[in-house]
Image (spheres, rainbow, N blue to C red):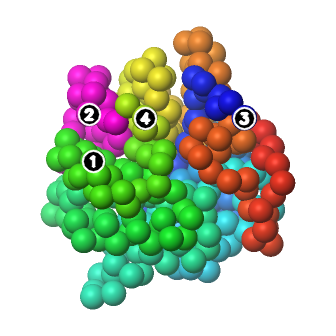
């Protein structure tokens, strides 16, 4: 089958680990809320959801298998979404932290995020992703048949990712997520986006996100450059200045309308799987589906 050319994959990152209901009451905490937000984004046109889980009561970042499993089960029973589980584990501590970060692989998601390179965050936090972790995670994802979403936050991260790719630990096609506007990574400007894109392998797939007010400009430029886009509460809680989004679906609907204006067709779930080189979706019982439906 010929790969759909030019179609735009929309990823919804529905809650992340930072925004709270105090910031925007629509931010989901419970597995049911996270699943429902994911399904709203799917119905609006998203083909991929990027999942973090939260303490259902407090909203604090969580990394519990039971919470991930409930979200995954709900999504598989109601959609053909491509499910991308986080392995960031920013808040995990101790000697077993790296092993714990790989726990989501046990749930057999379609994809997992793989953060390449360490980064200083505001507030004194350090996001630690040493070279040994990146290679271990990449190899374990490949053995499990799970595609890594290679997240890079700076130009040095890109260099590390490309050096890792040369050791053939990533199964082709490579899929990069360019993360712009995250303090203290690469700035969220069109110039920075162009510089990162210029360094990408010619045969890879790529997406980009912008944080906060950078979201819409980066989304727009990425659509024009032929990349894919990520939106959602993880990156931004406002639809416009001072106007909180009511749902992740608000961001997806805006991208669908923008893509239409800019001449990009939005990828269905089955299109997205073909573009990314993924097998058919798994059903709630864990068996592969025969066909991929249209989620948007």
Tell whether label 2 touches label 1 (CB within 8 Å): yes
Identified at 17% across, 57% down, the residue is: 120
Decide: few, some or many residues near mark 4? Use Cα within 10 Å; few <14, some 14-19, many ≥20.
few
Marks 4 and 2 sit apart, C-alpha to C-alpha, by 12 Å
Identified at 34% across, 78% down, the residue is: 98
- Residue 200 higher or lower than 78, as above or below: above
User: Does the stretch in magenta take in 126?
Assistant: no
Spot occupied by residue 2 in the image (x, y as percentages of width and height): 68, 30
Marks 3 and 4 sit apart, C-alpha to C-alpha, by 18 Å
> Which secondary structure lies at badge 4?
loop
Marks 1 and 2 sit apart, C-alpha to C-alpha, by 9 Å
Q: Nearer the viewer, mark 3 or mark 2?
A: 3
Residue under numbered circle 3: 1
Marks 1 and 4 sit apart, C-alpha to C-alpha, by 13 Å
Q: Earlier in the sequence, mark 1 or mark 3?
A: 3
Q: Earlier in the sequence, mark 1 or mark 4?
A: 1
Q: Is residue 28 left or right of residue 75?
A: left
Tell whether label 2 touches label 4 (CB within 8 Å): no
> Which secondary structure lies at badge 2?
loop
Residue under numbered circle 1: 162
Residue under numbered circle 2: 199
Marks 3 and 2 sit apart, C-alpha to C-alpha, by 29 Å
Using the rendered image of the protein, determine whether residue 146 is visible from the camera's viewpoint: yes
Q: Is residue 163 left or right of residue 212?
A: left
Residue under numbered circle 4: 203
- Residue 43 higher or lower than 108, as above or below: above
Q: Quadrant of residue 41?
A: top right
């Amino acid at each position: 089958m010929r790969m759909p050319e030019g179609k735009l994959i929309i990823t919804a990152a529905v809650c992340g680990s930072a925004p709270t209901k105090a910031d925007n009451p629509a931010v989901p905490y419970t597995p049911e809320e996270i699943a429902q937000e994911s399904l709203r984004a799917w119905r609006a046109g998203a083909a991929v959801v990027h999942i973090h889980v939260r303490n259902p009561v407090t909203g604090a970042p969580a990394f519990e298998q039971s919470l991930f499993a409930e979200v995954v089960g709900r999504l598989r029973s109601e959609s053909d979404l491509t499910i991308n589980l986080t392995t960031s584990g920013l808040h995990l501590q101790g000697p077993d932290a790296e092993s714990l970060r790989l726990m989501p692989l046990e749930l057999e998601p379609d994809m997992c995020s793989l953060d390449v390179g360490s980064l200083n965050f505001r507030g004194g936090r350090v996001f630690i992703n040493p070279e040994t972790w990146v290679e271990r995670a990449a190899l374990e994802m490949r053995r499990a048949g799970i595609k890594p979403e290679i997240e890079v936050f700076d130009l040095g991260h890109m260099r590390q990712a490309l050096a890792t790719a040369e050791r053939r630990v990533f199964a082709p096609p490579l899929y990069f997520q360019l993360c712009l506007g995250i303090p203290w990574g690469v700035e969220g400007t069109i110039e920075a986006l162009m510089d990162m894109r210029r360094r990408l392998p010619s045969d890879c797939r790529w997406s980009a996100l912008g944080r906060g007010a950078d979201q819409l400009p980066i989304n727009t430029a990425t659509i024009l450059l032929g990349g894919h886009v990520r939106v959602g509460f993880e990156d931004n809680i406002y639809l416009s200045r001072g106007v909180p989004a009511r749902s992740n679906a608000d961001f997806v609907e805006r991208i669908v309308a923008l893509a239409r204006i800019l001449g990009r067709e939005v990828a269905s779930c089955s299109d997205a799987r073909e573009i990314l080189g993924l097998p058919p979706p798994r059903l709630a019982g864990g068996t592969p589906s025969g066909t991929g439906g249209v989620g948007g």
